[in-house]
Image (cartoon, helix red, strand yellow):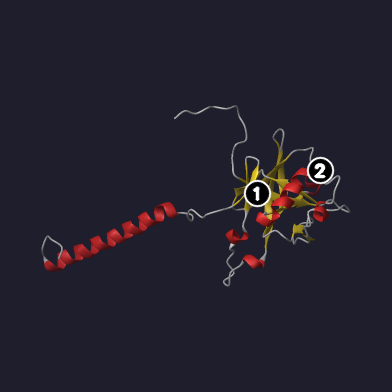
Amino acid sequence: MSRQNWKPGNMLYPLPAVMVSCAAAKERPNIITVAWAGTVCTNPAMVSISIRPERYSYSIIRDTGEFVINLTTKKLARAADYCGVRSGRDVDKFKEAHLTAIPAVHVGAPLIAESPVNIECRVREVLELGSHHMFLSEVLGVDVDDRYLDDKGKLRLNDAELMVYSHGTYYELGKALGTFGYSVRRKEKNNTAARGRKKHDEGKMQSTGSGLPC
């Protein structure tokens, strides 16, 4: 089996194709689709997005220090693509993509109502890395569409038909392969059962006085 070594490039796929909403004072809100987004810290909850400085949304987010990450789904694929290839300088993306802007709780940027989860963020630091600048941001709150909550209030996010982006193509998430920790769960269960049997057998040997289980 042979392999090729290519020059440095961004080949970490798949990625979440999220729609980031933002708004400057007294101006119409805007949306930019971002694939370079990720979780960076649990406590405090923090995320990052990376944007080219020439993009229209860049100055809005830098000036206001606020934005909302809106998760995308199969139904939002066309809207997400549109918001990634059209500029807010020229069009009203909420109107043209048939999306609904609703007020957020913690920031001035709006939520996208059609998104199953909206993550309200405040910028802590801007890292000017090169072609893209990274906005390291604290999560101030998370808004969830209650259609994806079960009768116990648990979020069933995978029922939303989430979408990802891989090497130029959007994909709907497909077949589940296992839950977190499944690779060791059965092994631990078997080891626990084996330890239980061993203790049971040792107990029998002690009670009978023989060296063999009975």
Q: Which residue is mark 1?
A: 47
Q: Quadrant of residue 110?
A: bottom right
> Quarter of the image containing the C terminus?
bottom left
Looking at the rendered structure, the kind of residue marked 2 is: Tyr
Query: Is residue 80 shown to the viewer in this render?
Result: yes
Looking at the rendered structure, the kind of residue marked 1 is: Val
Rendered residue at 60%/36% (across/down): 11
- How many numbered markers are drawn? 2
Q: Which mark is residue 118?
A: none
In this image, 154 relative to 100: left or right? left
In this image, 175 relative to 94: left or right? left
Q: Which residue is mark 2?
A: 56
Secondary structure, mark 2, is helix
Rendered residue at 28%/59% (across/down): 195
Across and down, in percent, residue 202 comes to: 19, 62
> Quarter of the image containing the N terminus?
top left
| Alpha carbons under labels 2 and 1: distance apart | 21 Å
Across and down, in percent, residue 14 comes to: 59, 44
Circle 2: is it few (<14), some (14-19), or many (20+) Cα within 10 Å?
some
